[in-house]
């Protein structure tokens, strides 16, 4: 069995070693621009270059080393529709997302950001406490990662809300569905956490009209994709005070350009797309198990629905 591997960072050796451990029967071929590849059975990629499409079009399945597949689906019909695309499910990302989002929610609820600013100014001044009943956390996307985040938040006692495309039921979480449910979901969410895949339907979902539906003084945490947020709208609403603050792990242009106004806005916290990193060992282990299932003709979890875009 041959696997075609592409790593944008060029650091392929540790991946080869992990494949040798978890799928010793596989030969790994590294993709290099301009070189003709041997016929490969499977491809393992994250955001492949366009020049790799010809090779991707001949494999039995493409395994993506991330939870989101927007960087692959952007090629549209250039990727033959019959080739299954399999994404990572959790693979160690769930706990990272839970840590990141819980930190952001507690930081705002306990006003740590304001205390940090006060401390830098040498100011000792207790602020009024927020109340949990006024601090509902709404998670856009109740998939593998959104669910982990809601589970992690549950012990703190915040009212929890979740929004998804299809109906869900989760103990302790008020659930909302589809375009009809979005309005009510937003109006009651003091903290909005975005955990959606980037698709034509979800692109730009956090824009002016939807942000205005959030309660006055709402917070936004985006750990999904930069294109979910209309950046100029967010800046306007932060300056007006309607949005109190935002934590953004993902941006439309990454790295965020030096001149971008977000850098100058103290109420916006930027992190460089680190909320849930791909963990190599866990990922290779999951991909190896899935390849074995594919070889055995068994169903594989994480198969992407190309028509839905996730
Ligand atoms: P899943 O596919 O498991 O979950 C996606 C969720 O979004 C589902 O609940 C789905 O609804 C919902 N959804 C999709 N489209 C719509 C829509 N049009 N309307 C309402 N709900 C919708 O994905 P994961 O939880 O594994 O990952 C989510 C995203 O997180 C990834 O796509 C990626 O973009 C991002 N991510 C970011 C990382 C980072 O480091 N910043 C790291 C990892 C992931 P339903 O359940 O009904 O299908």
Image: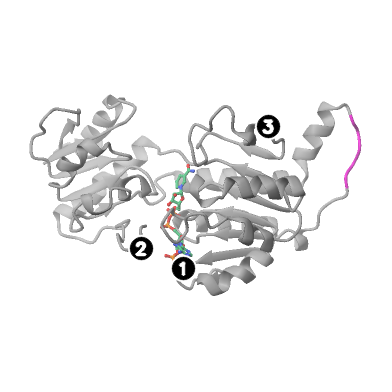
Quadrant position of the N terminus in the picture: top left
The answer to whether the residue bearing label 3 lies less than 8 angstroms from the nearest atom of ligand 1 is no
152 lies left or right of 300: right
The answer to whether the residue bearing label 1 lies less than 8 angstroms from the nearest atom of ligand 1 is yes
Residue 280 spot, x, y in % from top left = 35, 35
**Spatial distance from mark 2 to mark 1, Cα to Cα?**
10 Å
Residue 51 spot, x, y in % from top left = 21, 36
Q: Which of the two discs, 3 and 1, labels the residue nearer the N terminus?
A: 1
* Residue 219 seen in the current view: yes
- Give the residue number, with chain letter if any, for mark 1: 165
- Give the residue number, with chain letter if any, for mark 2: 308
- Image point (76%, 54%), residue name: 217
Q: Which residues are magenta?
A: 123-127
* Residue 173 seen in the current view: no
Q: Which of the two discs, 2 and 3, labels the residue nearer the N terminus?
A: 3
- Give the residue number, with chain letter if any, for mark 3: 264
Q: Nearer the viewer, mark 2 or mark 3?
A: 3
């Amino acid at each position: 069995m041959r696997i075609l591997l592409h790593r944008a960072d060029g650091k392929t050796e540790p991946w080869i070693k992990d494949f040798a451990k978890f799928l010793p029967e596989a030969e790994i071929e590294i993709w290099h621009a301009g070189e003709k590849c041997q016929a490969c059975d499977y491809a393992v990629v994250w955001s492949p270059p366009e020049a790799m499409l010809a090779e991707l079009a001949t494999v039995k399945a493409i395994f993506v080393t991330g939870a989101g597949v927007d960087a692959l689906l952007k090629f549209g019909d250039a990727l033959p529709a019959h080739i299954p695309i399999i994404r990572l499910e959790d693979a160690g990302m769930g706990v990272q997302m839970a840590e990141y989002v819980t930190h952001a929610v507690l930081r705002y609820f306990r006003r740590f950001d304001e205390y940090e600013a006060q401390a830098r100014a040498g100011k000792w001044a207790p602020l009024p406490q927020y109340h949990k009943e006024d601090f509902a956390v709404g998670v856009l996307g109740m998939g593998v990662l959104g669910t982990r985040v809601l589970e992690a938040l549950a012990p703190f006692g915040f009212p929890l809300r979740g929004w998804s495309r299809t109906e869900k039921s989760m103990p302790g979480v008020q659930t909302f569905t589809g375009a009809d449910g979005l309005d009510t979901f937003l109006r009651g969410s003091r903290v909005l956490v975005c955990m959606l895949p980037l698709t034509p339907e979800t692109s730009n979902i956090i824009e002016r009209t939807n942000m205005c539906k959030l309660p006055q003084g709402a917070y936004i945490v985006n750990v999904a994709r930069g294109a979910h947020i209309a950046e100029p709208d967010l800046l306007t609403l932060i300056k007006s005070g309607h949005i109190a603050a935002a934590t953004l792990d993902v941006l439309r242009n990454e790295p965020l350009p030096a001149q971008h106004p977000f850098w100058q806005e103290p109420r916006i916290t930027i992190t460089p797309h680190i909320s849930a990193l791909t963990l190599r060992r866990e990922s290779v282990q999951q991909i190896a198990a899935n390849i074995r299932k594919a070889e055995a003709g068994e169903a594989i979890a994480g198969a992407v629905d190309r028509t839905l875009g996730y």
